[in-house]
Amino acid sequence: MNNRIFSVILDYCGGKQTDLLYEKLSEWNPNFLIHILDNASPHNKSKYITHQNTKNTGIGGGLKDCVSLAKQHKCRYVLIITNDIHFQNKLDITYFDELVKEYPDIVQAGVSLTKNSDKRYYPWMINKGKRENRLVHHSDILCCVMDIKFIEDYGGFPDSWSGWGFDWELGYQACLNDKKIVICDVFKIKHVNEKRENDQVIWNMKLSELQKVYNERYGSYKKITPFKIR
């Protein structure tokens, strides 16, 4: 089994959708153990859970928990897969493993998105139709490999329920330290969130938390707003 990359699905009430992700990833990647961290789901649990939180830590806490698990397993990289994505083609983890081995200055490598995904604030993540790796200024943490040591060297992910700003800061620090973030058009996923009546309220709460967390860390959250592509 490969011990460079720790692969984990971050799950909350994913049920059958998470089971399907797990089954596909395991079938496609026999040389990698696929883990599932259940973030204290009250119902609709996956049948393949490998790690269980007794208390929900939010998306931000869940991401931090995934990094901690990877460190416990003495892995340099963590591949985090959120439970609300839909693979459009086969995800080969060996591709990521060879990529970071050949290019150690890559600190984050994420998959591309379909045009009908809901990430309108990440247009650079839309698949360009070519099987190549593209340099970008930051990538959403939906399905990506990240360098744990690099993240720890700049202070690690901060305490945050929503996790908003984690990708901004990673991109900011990558630019400061001449590291690379890439989108791999070799792989493609679809991501669509269901619309809810209180979406705007939730958005405002997450933005407020982002501002508070990164104002405290950098003096102003505006310092880490995404850089242009180098």
Image (cartoon, grey):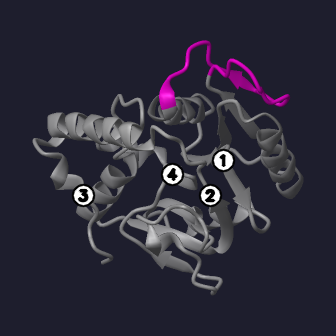
Q: Label for residue 191?
A: 2
| For marks 4 and 2 on the same chain, the one whose residue lies earlier in the sequence | 4
The structure residue drawn at horizontal position 40% and vertical position 37%, both measured from the top left corner, is 202
Query: Is there CB contact under 8 Å for labels 2 and 1?
Result: yes
Give the CA distance from mark 1 to mark 3: 25 Å
- Residue 225 is situated, as x and y percent measured from the top left of the image, at 24, 58
Per the rendered image, the range of residues in magenta is 40-58
| For marks 1 and 3 on the same chain, the one whose residue lies earlier in the sequence | 1
Give the CA distance from mark 4 to mark 2: 12 Å
Give the CA distance from mark 3 to mark 2: 23 Å
Q: Label for residue 141?
A: 4
Q: Which residue is most to the left?
A: 219
Asked whether residue 155 is in view, the answer is no
Asked whether residue 15 is in view, the answer is yes
**Residue at image mark 1:** 84
The mark closer to the camera, 4 or 2, is 2
Position of 73 compared to 49: left or right?
Answer: left
What's the residue type where badge 4 is placed?
Ile
Query: 160 or 14, which lies in front?
Result: 14
Position of 171 compared to 46: left or right?
Answer: left
Image quadrant assignment for residue 192: bottom right
Crowd rating for badge 3 (residues with CA inside 10 Å; few <14, some 14–19, many 20+): some
Image quadrant assignment for residue 178: bottom left
Position above or below: 79 against 125: above
